[in-house]
Amino acid sequence: MDHEARPDNEEQREQPQGIMTDTVAVDDETDRIPALPPVPARPVTATERLVSLDLLRGFAVLGILLINIWAYALPFPAAMNPRLIGLDLGWDRVVYAFVHLFAYTKMMPIFGMLFGAGLILFTRRVEERGGRSGRRWFARQWWLLVIGLVHGYLLWNGDILVPYAICGLIAYRARRWRPRTLVMLAMLLMVVPKVGMQGLAVFLDGVRTTAVEADAAIVAGDTLTIDQLEKQEMWHETVATWDPTRQEFDDLVTIMRGSYGDILGRAAPELLVMHLVMYPLGFGWNIVGFMLVGMALFKLGVIQGERSDGFYVRLAIGCYGTGLPAAWWMMGWIDAHHHDFIAMIRIGFISVEVTGPLVALGHIALVVLAGRRGWLGPLAPRLAAAGRMAFTNYLTQTLVCTAIFFGPGFGLFGALDRTALLGVVLAVWVLQLWWSPLWLGHFRFGPLEWLWRSLSYGSRQPLRITKG
């Protein structure tokens, strides 16, 4: 495999139209460092931004709240197993179906693809100025990791910054590969967690069978073997996590409505398991795969809006036409199996590795096309501003939602159904679409973007916009 291969020759692309005309041209035909005098590394200026990336980041950071709101506001079993709260109610079922079809497992691929595209854009710009992209990128990822650890262990254990920081370091090695190679490797990486999850499903099915036999043996007055005792305990712990009793459910709610120490004492160990087990053995492979796809899409000019309108129309129709029916079928299949834990594991790969990326690509095509054609109207600059402040807005969502739902705040954890939670999401969207352009009217970056850049570049970056 030629890791240093230059991108394939690509077709002549149309010049972007409408809102996309404020982008910079990026040469996809070479990754060589120009023979120019070194220029001090600095953050990208407003005139150098790719507006399509900002629109997509804005779309993704707002869309991710549709998923995260359940984790902010509901006990983990209810967030993962929707029948525990309100699924039999009319509007809650509609909200669940909407989120499942259009957002669940669809926003993480978009974030990953945008991260990969950003990797290519960032490293090329550093190299074009005569800088060392590896040093700058590793510094950037290091500080993202630090901020993610603070966010995850001290504020909310649903953090995704830590795995993105680590996966971004891995993806850096592939920055000069051909698009075809990137996509093929991404597909291969996504097979790894699929195999692992199927193995887990087989193992848990055996545990359940042994536990059921052990329960029957107890009723019959028989003595259990050590293996039966171990499997019985393991299965009962699994059931308590996925399908708790009313008392266990209420205990979870009480903890999250309690003190900061109570919440931290439960949340931190759960996140540690995610970091040490779930991401290395499962989701981390997918994240790297999504980044590689994003790198390929950038090299092919897809994310920047450099392809024809017809291309984006065909991409949206093709991806929505296959991804949405598959997601609908999967939702029905899971419902028919009563959201059984093992059934969810067996079928979950379809959502993560198939329907999620397909619908995500459909979203990307639609947002880019809408930006090019001016369909977003006055929403476009607000959405782009939210995207420019995606880091700040992501962490702001944590601050707002934990203040609403956790004990040290208003303590509404477990008190709202999915329909009411959708109202909270809409309110946060309005807030962020309002405050993002307002802030950027006076400052160059969002506050967290500024902090991240200052730490990454090792010097305090200018923040306030100077007049004249």
Image (tube, rainbow, N blue to C red):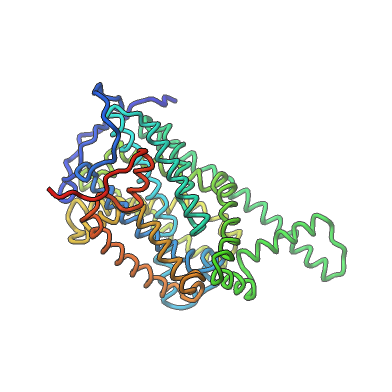
In the rendered image, which quarter contains the N terminus?
top left
Residue in front for this viewpoint, 406 or 327: 406
Residue 226 rendering spot, x and y as whole percentages: 83, 55
- State how many labels appear: 0
Q: Residue shown at 44%/72% (left/top)?
A: 418
Residue in front for this viewpoint, 455 or 410: 455
Residue 393 rendering spot, x and y as whole percentages: 35, 57
Residue 457 rendering spot, x and y as whole percentages: 35, 38
As drawn, which residue projects farthest toward the front? 460
Q: Residue shown at 61%/59% (left/top)?
A: 342
* Residue 270 appears in view: yes
Above or below — where is 412 with respect to 348?
below
Residue in front for this viewpoint, 391 or 109: 391
As drawn, which residue projects farthest toward the left? 468
Residue 82 rendering spot, x and y as whole percentages: 51, 68
* Residue 328 appears in view: no
As drawn, which residue projects farthest toward the bottom? 89
Horizontal side, residue 134 vs residue 300: left or right: right
Horizontal side, residue 281 vs residue 376: left or right: right
Above or below — where is 448 with respect to 289?
below
